[in-house]
Image: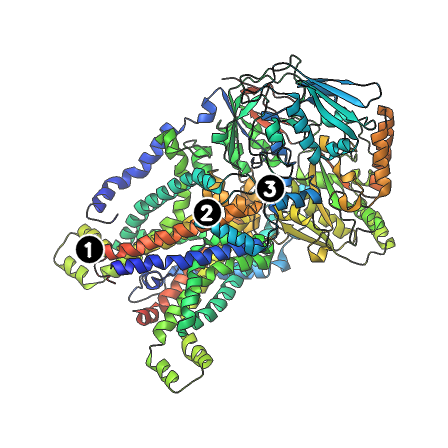
């Protein structure tokens, strides 16, 4: 499950083809997005300092209560404070998003560099990546969570695995075109060591597209976590996330929509901002990208 | 070109083979014992062991794998461990709702998204462009199940226009079918529309900047002909590509949507099977969905050669 | 190819109308919801999807309910917990060693063949291999034979006073009577043919595992003359078809009932009842007043719960009110009850459960824990994430245990993983466990014979494996008790012993109400939901 366009063999269509204004000017959109995202990040990061309740402490008497001065957004089915859970849950959701992005980008980068540079490895790696991509990512993720149990790391792992092939393809495409460049050929000719060529000459080329891809993976991971929770394969509710707060609250949608509304709003705002910033980053970086791939 | 098509089809074989091995190994590493679910709460350890043996779960893994592949090559997908029905007939009875809803979703999405993208590109940087772009980002940002619940709330509960849930086969009456399929399709379509509208707009903007379009405009060709005959036609390849890759999104959307709307399709079948560790069903379903994905993308790749005269292999 | 010259024209014409037209068409035609319109079919949403069709191989409730639809039983329990004749009458010899059952006239299987004593014998034998109560009887059985077409003679080596109650048991595995050829399937393999002699016929073509199952009225079924009472009496079918459908989403089912798309929900989610109660066409009511017992079981094999004092401390920390309040919410649908055999049953007695029923005693638990020398070994608590009636217990208990000074390692998992893992005798760190929760229908735990937790035979016992000869002694005493008073006296001692040694922790009873359209009438107030006696009016 990816919430953003996924690079494929026709990479340039998806990453490259989204139009770049010829004379790029930063609109108001990205600025608002940056501010919203900054507020969400700061608010959730410092949540433990100011939330009024322990997000885990239950009170059977206070179940499913409406907003009050004590419980700002009301309580959930266990009598836990919704506001505290949403703020702390945001921390975890963001952690899952950023974690999945970093891990998949890092692993994808390593595999992609190898694949793009070594012809022999390439054939095998790309067949495996094609196969991984053919498996519907959400089914793969549920199976992986079932395999490892619904812990935080296992969910991150399950979200990461299906993302890796997309990163690999991206890196490989960049490396393939970059290795034809004179300075890389020169480095090969003078006998620089392989790791050095890979790291010093090829890797930097991949940075820009990877940053863009990373933001999309981050947004997609947050969303995927919510869907895994919905399907009963998410993180335990002892660790609140936007996804599992919504998943737990979904049966109360008609009598207490706020259980879905607030985490849903935060999640959507957050993903919206990340996607917008990703688009902006891509547009800014795009001319270079296009030249390389064209 | 024929050579290309054959090469492309042959390339599918190793992909599917790796998927098969991978899925089999993944499942056998998963903790969980279908015998325990089968036997229920009161079974004793000794009874469990006997059931496990009768299900063939005590054989060594490589034997199980060889047996499975052997049967697979003869077209036998095995029998569900839990319900004891052939997997083939389970798929047979459950694939139609998914295919129908999926196809309808793609049609609805294309009908909505392509015009949206065209208008956005045509009125580039107007409010309508921003509206379309906002919608397309929003479509990625709201979880599918939330969209489903909102639609149910509005159309089924408040307005009472459509049934809350369920599935009716087109043979039960076309009205019954559409009335039940419409909300799931719209739910699923949100992501797809976002994706396709975005791609249409982007490709169109690119094409609109090309010389021949400017020439056409300069020659006074009507705007709608410029847009649809010249521009959209040339933007068709990226749009087709995104429909193919978006197919993966559709599959994950289907899994969720089928739960929300209670559609007895293969998405739910698979999730239920995973939660019950019904190995033969999970293996068959993942193989099947992967095969569909590969097949759809194969078709699209091949169709490029027909759509876009510039592409030759 | 969707992009061609005509595309824009088609689109132009269609763009304004397609959405509106689809909506309008759907609105006009779609209102014809088949379930509601058909007065001869009851569409019901049961508590779970039917996937296993062999009611002997599994103890799953949904499969047992399916069993009651298509099979019949020799004798059955009525609402006073008394065995009554159903397919057969019986006679007992004076020495209580020979039971003779005589099949009544007119019994037929769905394929038209008459039911014979041989069919019954084969069915009883297969049941005896699987059911815990059945195993006890077969332990003392000398012979079980069909002495003629209609007579079954069952000879015992020694008296088994609760014999009839066990054969008439309604849960979890009742001795359903199947044709001999089906009943000869080994009891470790599921049956492959689904033919019974019960009031409904299973429609195999329409069966979709986990999704829907359809039953048709069996035209040749001859009901008994007596008034229906629980599982006993005349099973008169008043509708043509009953269809069970599964809805994985609780809310979807609720909305469908209000909209009239379905007729019945066996167990609507407690918190969603207000939506149903707001609908004038729907009745929410308690069908089965006994309901369910929710309980916790500790693992006797591994620290910390291998120490009886630490088990006692844990029990002392727990509060039924907290668990039930969170699980159920509305006090109308739960009751605090410290009886291991359930409140409202003949053997129900609450000795020794004072802390459980009065809100727990955290301070007492702390003191006891200290006295026991608890070394901080974490309690591995298994939490199922996908069973709504089991999500609250672990969460609430974990909090109570932590307050009492326990270190709790709550491990979430799906129910499938849980049932697999609870069978593991390994230490918690190596894939084992310390504590889990489950729910029982009260008739399943209402006597020492059926209650699976009271088995004290170590590795052969139910998950948790208490090795407790005293418990076994008490159970044997109960089986040997030959009067109701004597049984009650032993049961009382078992109650006290169970709580003192924390064999398991009863956490109270809850009664999930059912919801039906007002057009559905005459449902029996039995623990097992049955569809005979039910009427559907227009």
Chain identifier of the residue bearing label 1 in the image: B
- As rendered, which of C224 and A33 lies closer to the eye? C224
Task: Report the side of A264 relative to C168 (left or right).
Answer: left
Q: Mark 2 against mark 3, which lies toward the viewer?
A: 2
Task: Tell me the distance, in whole angstroms, between the alpha carbons under discs 2 and 1.
Answer: 35 Å
**Looking at the image, what colour scheme do you see?**
rainbow
Mark 1 and mark 3 on one chain: no
In the displayed structure, C468 sits above or below C162; it is below
Q: Which residue is mark 3?
A: A66
- As rendered, which of C134 and A77 lies closer to the eye? C134
Q: Mark 1 against mark 3, which lies toward the viewer?
A: 1
Q: Position of residue A74 (x, y in %)?
A: 60, 45
Q: Position of residue C42 (x, y in %)?
A: 52, 24
Task: Tell me the distance, in whole angstroms, between the alpha carbons under discs 2 and 3.
Answer: 26 Å
Residue at the spot 44% in from the left edge and 27% down from the top edge: C33
**Which mark is drawn over residue C519?**
none
Chain identifier of the residue bearing label 2 in the image: B
**Which mark is drawn over residue B230?**
1
Q: Which residue is the extreme one toward the left?
A: B219
In the displayed structure, A114 sits above or below B16; it is below
Q: Position of residue B180 (x, y in %)?
A: 41, 34
Quadrant in the picture for the C terminus of chain A: bottom left
Residue at the spot 41% in from the left edge and 45% down from the top edge: B188
- Of pointers 2 and 1, the one earlier in the residue sequence: 2
Q: Which residue is mark 2?
A: B144
Query: Dot 2 surroundings within 10 Å: few (below 14), some, or many (20 or more)?
Result: many
């Amino acid at each position: 499950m990816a919430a953003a366009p996924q690079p494929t063999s026709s990479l340039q269509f998806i990453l490259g083809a989204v139009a770049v204004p010829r004379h790029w000017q930063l609109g108001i959109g990205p600025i608002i997005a940056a501010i919203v995202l900054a507020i969400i990040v700061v608010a959730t990061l410092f949540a433990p300092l100011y939330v009024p309740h322990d997000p885990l402490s239950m009170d059977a008497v206070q179940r499913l209560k409406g907003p009050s001065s004590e419980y700002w957004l009301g309580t959930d089915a266990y009598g836990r404070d919704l506001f505290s859970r949403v703020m702390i849950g945001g921390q975890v959701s963001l952690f899952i998003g950023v974690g999945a992005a970093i891990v998949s980008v890092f692993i994808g980068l390593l595999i992609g560099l190898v694949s793009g540079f070594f012809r022999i490895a390439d054939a095998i790696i790309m067949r495996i990546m094609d196969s991984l991509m053919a498996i519907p990512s959400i089914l793969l993720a549920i199976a992986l969570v079932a395999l490892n149990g619904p812990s935080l790391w296992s969910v991150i792992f399950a979200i990461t695995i299906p993302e890796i092939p997309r990163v690999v393809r991206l890196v490989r495409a960049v490396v393939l075109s970059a290795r034809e460049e004179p300075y890389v050929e020169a480095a090969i000719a003078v006998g620089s060591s392989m790791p050095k060529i890979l790291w010093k000459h090829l890797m930097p080329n991949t940075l820009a597209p990877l940053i863009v891809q990373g933001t999309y993976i981050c947004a997609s991971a947050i969303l995927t976590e919510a869907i895994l929770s919905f399907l009963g394969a998410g993180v335990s509710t002892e660790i609140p996330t936007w996804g599992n707060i919504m998943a737990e609250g979904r049966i109360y949608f008609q009598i207490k929509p706020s259980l879905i509304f607030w985490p849903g709003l935060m999640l959507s705002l957050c993903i919206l901002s990340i996607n917008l910033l990703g688009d902006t980053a891509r547009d800014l970086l795009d001319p270079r990208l296009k030249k390389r791939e064209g | 070109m024929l050579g290309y098509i054959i090469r492309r089809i042959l390339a599918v074989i190793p992909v599917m083979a790796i998927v098969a091995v991978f899925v089999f190994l993944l499942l056998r590493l998963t903790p969980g014992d279908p015998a325990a679910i089968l036997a229920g709460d009161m079974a004793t350890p000794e009874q469990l062991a006997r059931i496990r043996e009768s299900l063939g779960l005590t054989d060594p893994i490589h034997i199980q794998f060889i047996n499975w592949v052997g049967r697979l090559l003869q077209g036998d997908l095995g029998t569900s461990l839990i319900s004891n029905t052939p997997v083939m007939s389970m798929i047979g009875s459950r694939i139609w709702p998914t295919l129908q809803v999926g196809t309808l979703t793609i049609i609805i999405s294309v009908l909505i998204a392509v015009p949206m993208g065209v208008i956005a590109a045509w009125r580039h940087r107007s409010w309508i462009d921003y509206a379309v772009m906002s919608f397309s980002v929003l479509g990625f940002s709201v979880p599918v199940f939330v969209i489903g619940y909102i639609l149910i709330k509005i159309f089924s509960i408040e307005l009472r226009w459509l049934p809350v849930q369920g599935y009716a086969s087109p043979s039960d009456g076309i009205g019954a079918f559409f009335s039940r399929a419409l909300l799931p399709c719209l739910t699923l379509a949100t992501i797809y529309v976002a994706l396709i509208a975005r791609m249409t707009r982007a490709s169109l903007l690119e094409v609109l900047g090309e010389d021949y379009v400017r020439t056409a405009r300069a020659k006074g060709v009507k705007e709608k002909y410029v847009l649809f005959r010249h521009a959209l036609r040339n933007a068709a390849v990226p749009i087709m590509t995104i429909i193919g890759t978006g197919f993966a999104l559709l599959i994950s959307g289907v899994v969720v949507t089928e739960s929300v709307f209670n559609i007895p399709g293969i998405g739910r079948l698979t999730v239920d099977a995973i939660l019950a560790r019904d190995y033969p069903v999970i293996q068959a379903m993942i193989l099947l969905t992967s095969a569909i994905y590969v097949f759809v993308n194969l078709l699209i790749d091949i169709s490029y050669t027909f759509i876009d005269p510039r592409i030759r292999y | 190819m969707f992009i061609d010259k005509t595309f824009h024209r088609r689109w132009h014409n269609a763009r304004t109308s397609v959405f509106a037209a689809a909506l309008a068409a759907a609105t006009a035609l779609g209102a014809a919801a088949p379930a509601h319109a058909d007065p001869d079919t009851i569409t019901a949403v049961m508590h779970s999807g039917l996937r296993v069709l062999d009611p002997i191989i599994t103890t799953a409730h949904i499969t047992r309910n399916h069993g009651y639809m298509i099979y019949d039983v020799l004798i059955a329990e009525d609402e006073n917990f008394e065995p009554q004749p159903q397919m057969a009458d019986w006679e007992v010899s004076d020495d209580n060693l020979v039971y003779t059952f005589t099949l009544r006239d007119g019994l037929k299987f769905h394929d038209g063949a008459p039911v014979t004593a041989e069919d019954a014998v084969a069915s009883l034998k297969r049941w005896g291999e699987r059911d815990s109560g059945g195993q006890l009887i077969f332990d003392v059985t000398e012979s079980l034979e069909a002495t003629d077409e209609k007579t079954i003679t069952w000879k015992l080596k020694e008296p088994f006073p609760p014999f009839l109650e066990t054969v008439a048991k309604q849960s979890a595995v009742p001795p359903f009577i199947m044709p001999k050829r089906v009943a000869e399937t080994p009891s470790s393999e599921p049956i492959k043919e689904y033919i019974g002699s019960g009031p409904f016929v299973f429609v195999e073509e329409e069966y979709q595992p986990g999704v829907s199952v359809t039953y048709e009225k069996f035209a040749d079924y001859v009901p008994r003359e007596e008034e229906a009472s629980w599982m006993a009496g005349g099973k008169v079918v008043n509708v043509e078809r009953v269809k069970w459908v599964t809805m994985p989403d609780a809310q979807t089912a609720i909305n469908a009932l209000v909209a009239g798309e379905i007729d019945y929900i066996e167990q609507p989610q407690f918190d969603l009842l207000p939506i149903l109660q707001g609908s004038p066409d729907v009745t929410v009511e308690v069908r089965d007043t006994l309901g369910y017992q929710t309980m916790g079981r500790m693992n006797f094999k591994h620290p910390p719960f291998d120490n009886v004092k630490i088990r006692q401390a844990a029990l002392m920390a727990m509060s039924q009110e907290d668990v039930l309040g969170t699980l159920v919410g509305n006090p109308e649908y739960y009751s605090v009850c410290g009886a291991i055999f359930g409140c409202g049953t003949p053997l129900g007695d609450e000795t020794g459960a004072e802390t459980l029923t009065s809100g727990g005693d955290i301070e007492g638990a702390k003191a006891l824990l200290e006295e026991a020398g608890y070394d901080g070994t974490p309690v591995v608590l298994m939490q199922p994430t996908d069973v709504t009636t089991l999500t609250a217990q672990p969460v609430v208990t974990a909090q109570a245990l932590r307050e009492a000074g326990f270190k709790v390692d709550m491990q979430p998992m799906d129910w499938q993983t849980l049932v697999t893992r609870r069978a593991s005798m390994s230490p918690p760190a190596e894939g084992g466990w310390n504590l889990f929760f489950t729910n029982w229908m009260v008739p399943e735990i209402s006597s020492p014979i059926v209650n699976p937790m009271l088995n004290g035979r170590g590795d052969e016992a139910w998950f948790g494996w208490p090795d407790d000869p005293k418990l076994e002694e008490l159970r044997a005493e109960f089986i040997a008790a030959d009067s109701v008073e004597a049984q009650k006296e032993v049961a009382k001692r078992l109650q006290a012993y169970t709580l003192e040694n924390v064999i398991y922790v009863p956490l109270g009873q809850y009664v999930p109400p059912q919801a039906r359209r007002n057009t559905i009438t005459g449902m029996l107030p039995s623990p097992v939901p049955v569809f005979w006696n039910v009427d559907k009016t227009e």
